[in-house]
Image (cartoon, rainbow, N blue to C red):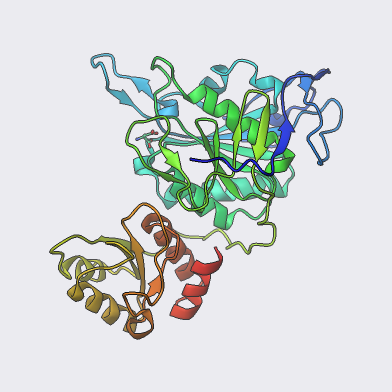
Amino acid sequence: MARKSATVFASVVAGVAVLVVGCSDPASDSAPASTTATSGRAAPAPASGQAAPAPGNLPRITILATGGTIAGKANANSAVGYTAGEASAKDLIDAVPGIDKIATLSTEQISNIGSQDMSDAVWLPLARRINEIFAGNKADGVVITHGTDTIEETAFFLDNVVAADKPVVLAGSMRPSTALSADGPANLRSAVQVAASPDARGHGTLVVLNDTIHGAHDVTKTNTTSLQTFVSPNDGPVGHVDAAEVHFYRPATEQHRPRFPVPENSMPRVDIVYSYAGVDADPVNDALGHDAKGIVLAGVGDGNTAKPVLSALGDAAKKGIIAVRSTRVGSGSTVRNAEVNDDDLGTVASLDLNPSKSRILVQLLLVNDITDPHKVQDAFATR
Ligand code: ASP
């Protein structure tokens, strides 16, 4: 993927450094009992165009660990098998030499699961904890270690409910911590570099893997096992990281974007219905039979599907169900009123949100009583 190099914002986070003794101890900031801390020793050089941390103070980064392959360990009896979510947050940072020269770190274990089991049971306390950390000025940035299977969903959820513009950066890995050439330590280092960079402020929630920085809205996993699995198919990545610097290709623009309050209770059921040749309306009717309040179509092509499915979606929309047309195709926009007449059906076009992120947006809209199709369409256009 071509990198946009016309405008490069660089933050130096390592390299030439003034040697000072790190003295802050985030563990004293009323952190949970599971918190551990490491204190940094070297201050970074000033970031371009941004206030540097006060002399003697490295950026304070809190690492919230949730599990995933980055915390995975090999199974003793298998050449390829491993179990996600085995190593602790402290194990993860201990595997990254020199990370204490980039930031003063504190760690909290939020969960230790494979992200295939991620749900709002983890999202809601995670989002609350991030808001609490920033509201109390307990950290300058947050890094979340996470499985790669649903990292883009968690990133999108947080992007919509974290109230501050301080950096929130998710990192995962494709190889478990015990693998040859495990990618987790490098990805964690990169994520801390990004979260410690003043230039990351206002970019919304970010995902960092394989030296590349992606925005929550666009990022998606495209390969089952490759290290270069994450892409931002519509807008391209927002930057990259090297050993010394964080480079953003465009300035932050998201400071004034509205956020939802973190939902108090688990979010309403919204189902995704996949389309294929020969599909019928049964999956839509099943979703309604299970009390789904919203349905997202993972349609063929431009959010299209067979006539019986479209008709069932239109009927659902007329009964107040939010019916969104997205696409199973990996890139491009689902266009409103192109081959499908959304005005007649009462459906909403997901534009460039993929089905799993569309589902989360519909859940957040339902929690906030936004169900009118025009208002739902506006939300898809602005988030
Ligand atoms: N199943 C793992 C997970 O999402 C895969 C990974 O992290 O790469 O937790």
| Residue 6 against residue 309 in the figure, above or below | above
Horizontally, is 31 left or right of 44 in the view?
Answer: left
Asked which quadrant contains residue 167, the reply is top right
Horizontally, is 194 left or right of 273 in the view?
Answer: right
In the foreground, 53 or 377: 377
Where does the image place residue 291, in percent across and percent down from the top left? 29, 69
Q: Residue furthest right?
A: 55
In the foreground, 304 or 196: 304
| Residue 192 against residue 159 in the figure, above or below | above
| Residue 205 against residue 108 in the figure, above or below | below
In the rendered image, the quadrant that contains the C terminus is bottom right
Q: Residue at x 39, y 23 (%)?
A: 176
Q: Residue at x 21, y 72 (%)?
A: 309
Asked which quadrant contains residue 97, the reply is top right
Location of ligand 1 given as a quarter of the image: top left
Where does the image place residue 2, in percent across and percent down from the top left? 52, 41
Would residue 281 be visible to someone looking at this image? yes
In the foreground, 189 or 34: 189
Q: How many numbered callouts?
A: 0
Horizontally, is 46 left or right of 162 in the view?
Answer: right
Where does the image place residue 81, in percent across and percent down from the top left? 27, 22
Would residue 372 be visible to someone looking at this image? no
Where does the image place residue 229, in percent across and percent down from the top left? 40, 36
Q: Residue furthest left?
A: 278
Q: Residue at x 36, y 52 (%)?
A: 330
